[in-house]
Image (cartoon, rainbow, N blue to C red):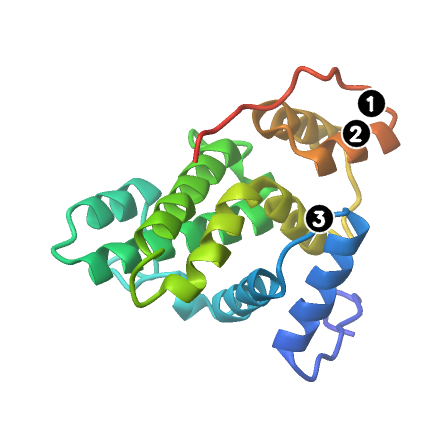
Amino acid sequence: MDDSGKSVLAVASLREFFRDCLHGVLLKQHVSVAEQTEQYVVNLLTLFARAESLYEDTPAGPRLRPLAVMLCEALEAESAPARNHALQRLGDVSLFIAGFFAQGFAAKLIDIDYHIAMGGRAYGTLAQSTARGSQRALAGVFAELAGKFQPLVDALNEISESAYRHSDRDILRLYEIWLKTGSARCFGLLKRLGVDPSHAGGTAFAH
């Protein structure tokens, strides 16, 4: 146990831990993705588990670069490889942040639906631009990440909140997230918590 009295899970391999968790959650939520796509997400989670891979050094200390800045860098890139790299970074960061920090958006101006829209569009554009290039083997992965961005965010939400107890404030936040994204996971959680949301929630985003 740690100093707070909570149990600490010993994991021999972080990659194996994420692989088992993600695979189990995808099965539970009835989300089907290709093996390559599932492995891509596992690698992403393993990479961003190290803060130095997610955050960037700035004079003010480690910071997460705003998504709008990443998008501008992609649009202004001087070469196709640089543009693709910036788009991939945008998609990866958006997926990770939306998946693991959804509750933290509650008091911020930019909410989870913004990250879902930006990330999905980044992957969608990347799928098109890599279809004939040296990364064409990944084009299908990027296309699936774009098309199933919301269900994958739901899967990561469940991994991050597996031991989380929902307070009244959390229920309101779940409802807010469901209204903005149409998350099937949030809908199911609300139903289990005794809340019966309407079927009008969700925002359609073109990728």
Closer to the eye: label 2 or 3: 3
Secondary structure category for the residue under label 2? helix
User: Quick check: 199 above or below 49?
Assistant: above
The image quadrant of residue 26 is bottom right
Q: Quadrant of the N terminus?
A: bottom right
- Nearer the N terminus, badge 1 or badge 2? 2
Residue 3 x, y percent position in the rendering: 72, 70
Image marks 1 and 2: residues in contact by CB distance under 8 Å: yes
Left or right of 132, for residue 34: right
Q: Which residue is mark 3?
A: 31
Left or right of 46, for residue 155: right
Residue 145 x, y percent position in the rendering: 52, 50
- Nearer the N terminus, badge 3 or badge 1? 3
How many residues crowd around disc 2 within 10 Å: few (fewer than 14), some, or many (20 or more)? some
Q: Which residue is mark 1?
A: 195
Q: Is residue 64 visible?
A: no
